[in-house]
Amino acid sequence: MSRKTIIISGGTLPEQAVLEILKEHEGASIIGVDRGMEFLYRHGIKPDYLVGDFDSVSEEIADYYRNKTRIPIREFNPQKDVSDTEIAVRMAMTLGGKKILILGATGGRLDHLWANIQTLKVAFQAGADAEIIDSQNRIRLIKDVFTLKKEDAFGKYFSVFPFGEAVYGVTIKGAKYNLDGKTLEFGNSLTVSNEIIGSELSISSSSGILIFMETKD
């Protein structure tokens, strides 16, 4: 399996953006997750693996993958203790994925979005680089020292938030609003909607994990 994995989950999948990402990362392994299978089916894209409880996939498409392909399927009971996306992330890591792009992780269900953001920690703690991407946003976890060149930024704005516990010694350089050794606690909106103005953004902290969000709008 490729060390780069794209997970097609069951949330909002803007057609053009998803197809462009798949083209950009041609050769990556693809895991279809539940309703994300319908996107793959419609576009004739063959995934390497399929996972999910199949509760939001049409019976026609589910039967096609079960009976007319040899794609490995891990099917679960809908009454389970983890989300389909988390199962896919754990599968990607088990198969050697070190770079994981999660598409279809955002949409109308905010509870699903929050669960998917928390799932990033599963990969993060295992040393894998996982990102949630849609047409407007890129979300990942960072700690210690993180740098991003301006030309590699996903969008105009970025925000950082503590992931659970307080994060100490947060220093931001190269931004419109810099920080020097600030403590960020849950519920603090100080670091929302910042901009990179230097050639490179640098974010460092002495402890804790930060959610790093980039947005185009």
Image: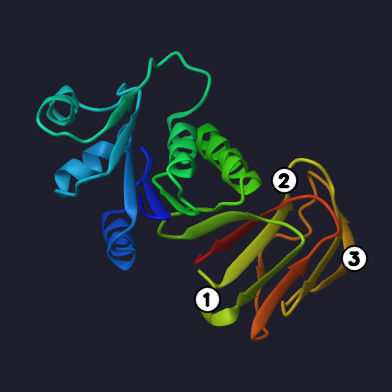
Task: Give the class, few, some or many, for how many residues have Cα within 10 Å of label 3's Cα (few <14, many ≥20).
Answer: few
Which residue is labeled 3 in the image? 181
Q: Where is residue 21 in the image (x, y as percent from the top left)?
A: 34, 62
Q: Where is residue 186 in the image (x, y as percent from the top left)?
A: 79, 44
In terms of image quadrants, where is residue 191?
Answer: bottom right
For the rendered model, the colour scheme is rainbow
Q: Which amino acid does label 3 sit on?
A: Gly
Whether 215 is drawn above or below 6: the answer is below
Q: Which amino acid does label 1 sit on?
A: Asp
Work out whether mark 1 precedes mark 3 in sequence or the reverse, and give the earlier one. 1
In terms of image quadrants, where is residue 125?
Answer: top right
Which residue is labeled 2 in the image? 163
Query: In the rendered structure, are the residues bearing label 2 and label 3 in contact, judged by CB atoms less than 8 Å apart?
Result: no
Q: What residue type is labelled 2?
A: Phe
Q: Position of residue 41 (x, y in %)?
A: 17, 41
Which residue is labeled 1 in the image? 152
